[in-house]
Image (tube, rainbow, N blue to C red):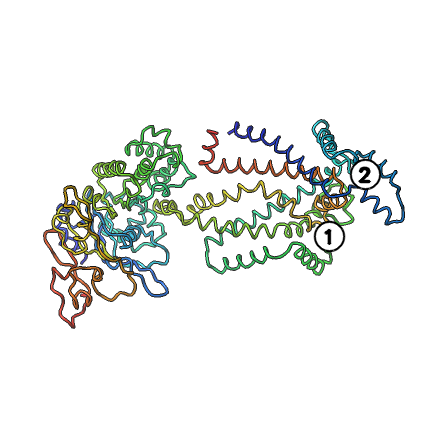
Amino acid sequence: MIRYIAKRTLVMIPVSLAVSMIVFFIIQLPPGDFISGYAAKMSASGEVMDAQALAKLRENYGLDRPWYTQYFSWIWGILTSGDFGYSLSYNRPVSEIIGQYMGITVIISLATMIFTYVVAIPIGILSAVKKYSFFDYFATGVGFLGMATPNFLFAIILMFLSFQWWGDPMLGLFSPEFADAPWTAAKWMDLLKHMIIPVIVIGTSNTCELIRVMRGQMLDEMSKPHIVTARAKGLPEWKILLKYSMRAAVNPVISTIGWSLTTIFTGSTITAIVLNLPTQGPIMHRALLSQDMYLAGSWLLLMAIFTLIGTLLSDILLAWLDPRIRLDRKEA
Amino acid sequence: MVQTEAQQSGSLMRAASPLPGARKALEVRNLRVGFPTEEGMVQAVGGIDLEIERGRTLALVGESGCGKSVTGRALMALQPKHAEVSGEIWLTPGRQEAQLDRRLRASSENGSFNLLQFKPGGKEMRHVRGGLISMIFQEPMTALSPLHTIGDQIMENILLHRTKNRKEARSIALEMMERVGIGNAQRRLDQYPHEFSGGMRQRAMIAMALSCQPALLIADEPTTALDVTIQAQVLELMKQLQHELGMAILFITHDLGVVAETADEVAVMYLGRIVERAPVRELFRNPKHPYTKGLMRSIPRIGGVGGRLASIEGTVPLPLNRPPMCGFYERCSERIEGVCNRQDVPESDAGPGHKVRCFLYSEPEKKGDNPHE
């Protein structure tokens, strides 16, 4: 198993490099660059920049060189000194910006994941056990509604309701009085309170989908012949459910944990913009619009690496859960 | 009342009961299993009687859909929830009362229990399942959980019924594995089902089923999914273990070759009824019911005259809202118009221990009589 993990980790290196190259290539594909966008903004505010000044700027930032040269100096900086380049629109190193937003992004994503699993798995299981009951129909109805509602609309509705009931739309992640305050218990409470709406909005569609998956898995597992064997041994129903059906039904769900993290990362951009969250979504969005290539490229690269690590984690989890896969891997 | 019936029919069978007045290991009286559907009740089992003595094997034979598997499941109350079951299922474990669970002891009548008095998922029934009656299934591939070790699955049974001590349970499991002929048992216990071949899995299933020394083993087509050489080994193993442990076996199968090898008595089932029952040699030598005869003709024989193998025309009708009449009427070549399709067929004697449900061997009742006896 350790050999398998080591092998997989080694394979991740060339894959990450290939991904970084593709990412960089795609980002620089649209015509123009950050400087041309900058010039357009300047001229809109009445300031005209001549071609010479622009060329000078390009030279300073190295934007006049071909894309592969730019790519190699960028990737070289990352590999040798952890330097992700310089964000042109923020006028700060990319690593600094990433550092600033990464923490909150990860907290919100993890909270959303936990919310999704804690809500979806029990409801899915109960729906299957009480198939065609009122509860099952209710969960199914709510589930389809949740899947069909666009996130931005859901966010606006929740903000409106929050404003109606508590007089606060819960925009952002901190109340103004805590925004710059040091981390105290009160500030944590404030953060938790503000996280409710984002977590629900980002998590609902995933939760609803997972309820369906879980219900289907459970129904499938509950009708397997070895469940009859267990019953014929005299095991009580609840134990059969716990030891056999549920144990087998959660496997595919758990084995996709790795990917779902990235889905939440990338899927929450619109929600983050609507709710004014200080997470990576809006930053990424703006970086792409302004062709801030190093910032955008670094985010995408990190995302790709997260996906790779997530997939590896999923595979390890699945091997740990399923002996058939585990033994297969042992020989590999 | 039932007791005297049992004694009467018992005198026809070969061996006498161990105690005077004691019941056989299993006695089933008028068992019915129905499935309510929107169009009406599908009567999968339409009132059958069965009895098996300790240490003997009864083969329940019939084609797919005749209700034989449903019967086997109903004996352990494993039928689907919506099924309606009635009749009597008397189990006589034949062991000291003190060894039995307190709840079971309370409902015992001279050491016998009517299993239908228990709730299907209730505590009493769960003591019966795995403890007093065990079952092995057709598909050893899917009847074991792929996520748990063989040892864990065998020990589970032992821990439920015999001991609470894991170490002791493991040593019993080990002994059972060796007994069913699985070599290197110590290591095999910690392996998973996918590391076992089909025959080995079925041996493990047998080890699991017999680990608590049940009074009755229900084998639901245990060799159908195995190839012929393995099939013979598994049958031989079951016979040998039956000899050692003395349990009764209900062998559900559609394979007459297997019946000839394993059974002491045979019951032929058709459309939810037992149409003929007899000791195995008597049945093969002297089949009475047109359906049994048809079955016999469809066995290939060495040295037989060339030509096509006989088959029975038509298919089994759906047992839905059927009027009282012979179930085989539509496909029978010897049917008596106006008799077989007018009334229920009673069971009649056709020799020592040989009973058949056919008007060729009994006088139909006069018109105006109650066709239901």
Q: Which image quadrant is residue B291 in?
A: bottom left
Label total for image: 2
Q: Where B198 falls versus B8 (above or below)?
A: above
Is A26 left, or right, of B68 in this rendering?
right
Which residue ends up furthest to the left in the rendered image? Answer: B351
Q: Quadrant of the N terminus of chain B?
A: bottom left
Cα separation, mark 2 vs mark 1, equals 27 Å
For mark 2, does the 10 Å Cα neighbourhood hold few (<14), some (14 to 19), or many (20 or more) residues?
A: few
Q: Where A305 falls versus A149 (above or below)?
A: above
- Residue B23 visible here: no
Pinpoint the chain carrying mark 1. A
Picture disc at residue A171: 1
Mark 2 or mark 1: which comes first in sequence? 2
Q: Amino acid at mark 1?
A: Leu
Task: Indicate the position of residue B246 as horizontal and vertical percent values.
Answer: 21, 40
Task: Indicate the position of residue A96 as horizontal and vertical percent values.
Answer: 75, 36
Q: Secondary structure at mark 2?
A: loop
Q: Nearer the viewer, residue A88 or B200?
A: A88
Q: Nearer the viewer, residue A122 or B310?
A: B310
Q: Secondary structure at mark 1?
A: loop
Circle 2 sits on which residue?
A: A91
For mark 1, does the 10 Å Cα neighbourhood hold few (<14), some (14 to 19), or many (20 or more) residues?
A: some
Task: Indicate the position of residue B126 as horizontal and vertical percent values.
Answer: 34, 48
Q: Which image quadrant is residue A50 in?
A: top right
Q: Mark 2 or mark 1: which is in front?
A: 2
Residue at figure coordinates x 14%, y 67% from the top left? B365
Circles 2 and 1 on the same subunit: yes
